[in-house]
Image (cartoon, rainbow, N blue to C red):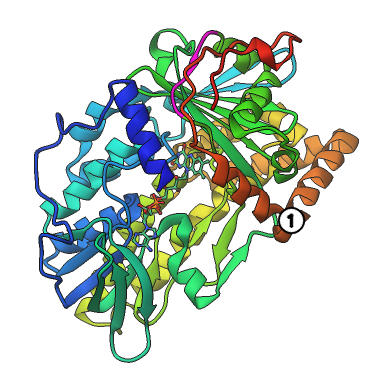
């Protein structure tokens, strides 16, 4: 896949290649080296955070687990900013030290409004429960490799560069067919299937149960820079979010000096692209003077990628012999960096339910229901804020944080991912939402127009939008630019020293 080579190239270029310095060496079966196992208790489709976590937990409980990944770790993946409540999960997996070693500490989020570039920092230490004051930003190639190797260390049998092509759920078991690196077909008979195929949504596609989110639609363009200006001192590792007229940007500092920058925008805006993705990305950055300033003199170290990250959800996540985890079930939007946490949390809940199912399917029913309810609760909690993130009212409330009825503490707990432990934030969040509605009412014209813009984005027909995303994806990663980025000061594009093919 193109992502793969681009990441390797950029890793080599910036000296951050994923050597196993902090990872104990271990051999992972490659399809050529092993004889295909024909049976297993659980087949895990996909070796991202959700799949690797579930495979580790199930193997640890003594089940015969096979995990199959279509790429080979380390491989590029977007989604580098983690949340504080990820840390207890790392601890449970015994990976806290390894993740700390590859991460930069993120104490909070800087929000930068488009007006006068005013900014505010939301600090996790002010959340309801003060016990989780920070998270990490990580290179996903390293992070995902650690999780994947962990499941192998716990006893899962892993196959890489092996793509699942078909699943048969009829009959008494699950049949899985895959194509390995050499082009040979492999077949497994499993008691249970865990679909953790991420945004490929393997099972939801095969079953025809994937649905576009009727309330949200967006797309992203992103790349890595070296030499970006970071926040000073302790805040160096904080994520920064810059709002702009077509959406918002992320600015995520990584440990090796690289900064991940992405624009999440309305699909109509992506559709307006008339230039190659790199030029379009840099032009888009120029629309946010505050971000452009932070990137003055910075160097783009990999090629720009475009992703149609329109939101979706499958109709169900539990079947008679399968569950879906993480992005394989649903994806909303990356604005609150919730994806990895939701994926890993669903893996913990899902593994618990599958473990029970393997012992006695009838006894597993309450756990399957709990899994389903908790996953939906997590998605719902973030979604309310995600849908409104570009509205003037929410921007106003975020930029002027106040804590009556502990609203601010509750909001920070939500942003930290503290949604699954019974922290009593519900009423304070309701109070926050009431204040949001009152604020929207007071400035009805501006908020209504923002709401209409969002509706328009959602209504952008998929038929209209998908080819654009595909075209963008087809062009990306064709070149690794090496020039310097200069914020545009009214000069034309030639002022930028980006080398292109
Ligand atoms: C633009 C963007 C920015 C984001 N930013 C953030 C962020 O800052 N923080 C955050 O927490 N989240 C972020 N996310 C979301 C995050 O990337 C995902 O939520 C997270 O990776 C989900 O984990 P997962 O294990 O469910 O899926 P994935 O990480 O996608 O893993 C799925 C795996 O399955 C494999 N696979 C797929 N199909 C097959 C097949 N047929 N056979 C074998 N293997 C297969 C894939 O190769 C992949 O390795 C972002 C997402 C996008 C689109």
Please give the name of the residue rendered at 42% of the width and 15% of the height, measured from the top-left corner.
236
Magenta stretch: give its range. 297-302
Residue 204 drawn at (x, y percent): 49, 70
Q: Compare residues 68 and 152 and report the one nearer the observer.
A: 68
Residue sticking out furthest to the front: 501
Q: Compare residues 193 and 277 and report the one nearer the observer.
A: 277
Q: As drawn, is 415 to the left or to the right of 138? A: right
Assign the C terminus to one quadrant of the image: top right
Residue 400 in sight: no
- Give SS at disc 1: helix
Q: Is residue 300 magenta?
A: yes
Residue 445 in sight: yes
Instruction: Specify the principal SS of the magenta part.
Output: loop
Q: As drawn, is 341 to the left or to the right of 337? A: left
Q: Is residue 410 magenta?
A: no
Residue sticking out furthest to the right: 445
Residue 218 drawn at (x, y percent): 65, 45
On screen, 198 above or below 485?
below
Please give the name of the residue rendered at 60% of the width and 54% of the height, measured from the top-left corner.
311
On screen, 477 above or below 285?
below
On screen, 478 above or below 153?
above
Q: Quadrant of residue 162?
A: bottom left
Q: Find disc 1 in the rendering and name its residue.
A: 464
Residue sticking out furthest to the bottom: 171
């Amino acid at each position: 896949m193109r992502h793969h080579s681009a990441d390797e190239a950029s890793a080599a270029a910036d000296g951050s290649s994923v050597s196993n310095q902090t990872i104990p060496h271990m051999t992972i079966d490659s399809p050529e080296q092993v004889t295909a196992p024909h049976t297993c208790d659980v087949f895990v489709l996909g070796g991202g955070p959700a799949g690797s976590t579930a495979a580790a937990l199930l193997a640890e409980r003594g089940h015969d687990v096979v995990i199959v990944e279509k790429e080979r770790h380390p491989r590029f993946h977007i989604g580098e900013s983690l949340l504080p409540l990820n840390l207890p999960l790392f601890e449970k997996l015994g990976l806290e030290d390894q993740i700390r070693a590859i991460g930069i500490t993120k104490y909070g989020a800087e929000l930068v409004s488009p007006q006068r570039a005013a900014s505010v920092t939301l600090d996790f230490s002010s959340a309801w429960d003060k016990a989780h004051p920070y998270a990490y930003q990580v290179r996903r190639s390293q992070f995902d490799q650690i999780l994947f190797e962990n499941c192998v260390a716990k006893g899962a049998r892993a196959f890489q560069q092996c793509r699942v092509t078909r699943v048969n759920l009829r009959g008494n078991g699950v049949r899985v067919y895959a194509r390995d690196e050499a082009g040979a077909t492999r077949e497994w008979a499993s008691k249970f299937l865990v679909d953790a195929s991420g945004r490929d949504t393997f099972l939801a596609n095969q079953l025809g149960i994937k649905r576009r989110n009727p309330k949200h639609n967006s797309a992203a363009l992103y790349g890595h820079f070296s030499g970006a200006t970071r926040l000073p001192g302790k805040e160096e590792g904080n994520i920064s979010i810059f709002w702009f007229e077509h959406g918002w940007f992320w600015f995520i500092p990584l440990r090796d000096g690289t900064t991940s920058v992405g624009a999440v925008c309305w699909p109509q805006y992506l559709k307006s692209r008339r230039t190659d993705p790199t030029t379009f990305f840099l032009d888009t950055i120029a629309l946010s003077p505050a971000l452009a300033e932070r990137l003055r003199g910075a160097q783009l170290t990999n090629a720009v990628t475009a992703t149609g990250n329109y939101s979706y959800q499958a109709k169900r996540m539990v079947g008679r012999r399968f569950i879906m985890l993480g992005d394989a079930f649903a994806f909303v939007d990356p604005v609150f960096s919730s994806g990895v946490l939701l994926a890993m949390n669903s893996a913990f809940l899902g593994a618990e339910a599958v473990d029970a199912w393997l012992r006695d399917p009838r006894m597993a029913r309450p756990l399957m229901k709990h899994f389903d309810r908790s996953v939906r609760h997590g998605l719902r909690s973030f979604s309310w804020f995600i849908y409104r993130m570009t509205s003037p009212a929410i921007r106003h409330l975020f930029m002027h944080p106040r804590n009556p009825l502990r609203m601010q503490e509750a909001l920070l707990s939500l942003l930290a991912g503290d949604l699954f432990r019974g922290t009593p934030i519900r009423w304070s969040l309701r109070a926050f939402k009431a204040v949001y509605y009152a604020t929207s009412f007071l400035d009805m014209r501006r908020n209504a127009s923002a709401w209409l813009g969002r509706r328009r984005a959602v209504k952008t027909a998929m038929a209209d939008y998908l080819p654009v995303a595909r075209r963008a994806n087809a062009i990306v990663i064709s070149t690794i630019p090496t020039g310097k980025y200069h914020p545009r000061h009214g000069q034309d594009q030639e002022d930028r020293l980006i080398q292109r093919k």
